[in-house]
Amino acid sequence: MSWVSDYKYTWTERFAMRTLRACGHIPHHVAFVMDGNRRFARSQQIDKIEGHSRGFEKLADCLRWCLDIGVREVTTFAFSIENFKRSSEEVEGLFNLAREKFARLLEETARLDEHGIRIRVIGNIELLPLDLQKLVASAMLSTERNDKLFLNVAFAYTSRDEITQAVDTVLRHGCRDLAAEDISERLLAECLYTRHSPPPDLVFRTSGETRLSDFMMWQLSTSVLYFSNVLWPQITFWHFLASILAYQRDRWQLEDFRRAERMQSVQLAKTSDFYSERVLKFLATIDEDRRKLLVRLAAN
Ligand code: FPP
Ligand code: MG
């Protein structure tokens, strides 16, 4: 199964998609918490890894729907650091699935280039087996020139770990280059894995759970949260459209907060030296270090 499916729309689906595009705002960035794979597997009496594999197929459909409706950034929660606590059989099964999918991705980079898709794995990838680190790093490097749709795969990820890593980055590298007055909320945001992404506009979690489960907790303060009872492998285009509709209905309330945040940033940029040479140099170092790490992992 390819990363972008060849989903065939019915004419009613096409009509509904065009109507939503014409009548309302399409979210720029959508995040998916793909939950319910094992319950789906139990209900179908199939192995749980087969349930996760069906989940991947739905991710490929979602990517196609996002591309076609005009979403420009997708983040998906594929493996939490908490998932390391599952049975070794399931963890190994999920890693094997990831190995297969990232290897497939490397074979189909032409297809991703055609759609302009850039893959970024966000998470503590050094916690993964070495061969998977290599695959993940190679996937990121091989799509790094694309910029039409960004797909962030959260793998070995939790928000608390992400924030801890950001503090570590400031302490390790910043102590040499930064002054105490440079440390701010915005600087920490620049040290997160999502440094180059706007916050999600919409988060869609399946399976009836109404928790964030340590997913993008820093980034979601002004996002529309949409929860559905459907199990992830059973998600359809209509569930997806329902989430877009909910976003179009609720975004106005959140837009006020975002506007206030943007105004505050403009004020800050005018009054502080956040964009001083010192900070800019530090931020460039973060990008350089991250790329060097990927090149090293891909070459291992
Ligand atoms: C949550 O359902 C799902 C996961 C922990 C794994 C999701 C992974 C995939 C869909 C494959 C993605 C692979 C790549 C390479 C992107 P659950 O296991 O918590 O199910 P449950 O809630 O019914 O127990
Ligand atoms: Mg679950």
Image (cartoon, rainbow, N blue to C red):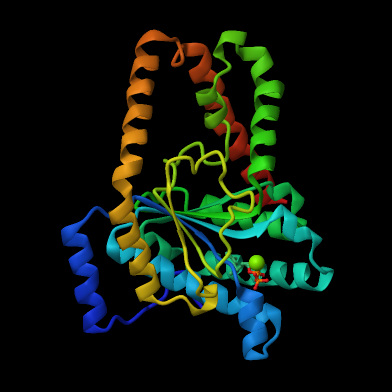
Determine the residue positioned at 31% across, 35% down: 256
The residue drawn where x is 52% and y is 30% is: 190
Q: Which residue does the image show at 56% across and 59% down from the upper left?
A: 210
Residue 63 left/right relative to 85: left
Q: Which residue is pictured at 38% across the width and 22% down the height?
A: 265
Report which quarter residue 101 is drawn in. Answer: bottom right
Q: Whole-percent x and y of residue 133?
A: 69, 54
Above or below 150: residue 279: above
Q: Farthest residue to the bottom: give it.
A: 45
Of the pair 178 and 147, the residue shown nearer to us: 178
The image quadrant of residue 252 is: top left
Looking at the picture, does residue 12 appear above or below residue 188?
A: below
Q: Can residue 208 be seen? A: yes
Residue 203 spot, x, y in % from top left = 46, 55
Side (left or right) of 132 relative to 141? right
Tell me if I can see residue 179 in this picture: no
